[in-house]
Amino acid sequence: MHETQTKERAGDEVVANDVRLVGRVTGEPTALELPSGDVLVTFRISVPREGRSGPQQGRSQGVDSVPCTVWSPRLRRSVLGWRAGDLVEVSGAVRCRFFQAGGATRSRVEVEASAARIIRRSPAA
């Protein structure tokens, strides 16, 4: 449905929108049906920050909680089997999605996954 990774030439520069994240799933992935009838799965992963020097030094936030979406039917089925605490790898692209909510247009920045896999399962609760 969506091309999630693009590389092209812009003059003498190569531009790219490629993301690779490794982190822990923070909650159960959720399937959502949009008003258009499209279905997507949303989830968040917690990714530890590295190299806390410079402007970030001394701040208490040591992780980033990254919202992710999946559009591909095969990948949606796989991700819906994940559970909180699973260590996962997600590859895709950064997207800014616009939608209507409460009579207003809103936006959301997220990683649109084109590939994802479990590295290690969380112990069963």
Image: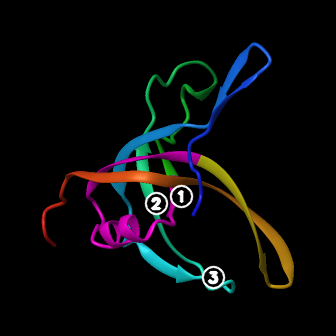
Three-letter amino acid code at the position of disc 2: Arg
Mark 2 surroundings: few (<14), some (14-19) or many (≥20) residues within 10 A: many
Question: Which stretch did the figure color magenta?
Answer: 66-93
Q: Answer left or right for 119 relative to 80.
A: left
Q: Residue furthest top?
A: 12
Is residue 53 placed above or below 3 in the rendered structure? Answer: above
Q: Which quadrant holds residue 91?
A: top left
Give how far apart the Cα atoms at labels 2 and 3 are: 19 Å
Secondary structure at badge 3 equals loop
Amino acid, disc 3? Leu
Three-letter residue code for mark 1: Pro
Q: Which residue is mark 2?
A: 44
The image quadrant of residue 11 is top right
Task: Answer with mark 1 or mark 3, whichever residue precedes in sequence.
Answer: 3
Q: Earlier in the sequence, mark 2 or mark 1?
A: 2
Which element type, helix, strand or loop, lies under badge 2?
strand
Q: Residue under circle 1?
A: 67
Of the residues under marks 2 and 3, which one precedes in the sequence? 3
Q: Nearer the viewer, residue 99 or 85?
A: 99
> Which residue corresponds to mark 3?
34
Contact (CB < 8 A) between labels 1 and 3? no
| Separation of residues labelled 1 and 3 (CA atoms) | 17 Å
Q: Which disc is residue 11 wearing? A: none
Q: Residue at x 29, y 67 (%)?
A: 82
Q: Secondary structure at mark 1?
A: strand
Residue 69 within the magenta-colored segment of the rendering: yes
Q: Residue at x 30, y 67 (%)?
A: 78
> Which quarter of the rendering shows the C terminus?
bottom left
Q: Is residue 108 left or right of residue 57?
A: right
Residue 119 x/y as whole percent? 22, 48
Question: Tags 2 and 3 in contact by the CB under 8 Å rule?
Answer: no
Residue 1: percent from left, percent from top: 57, 64
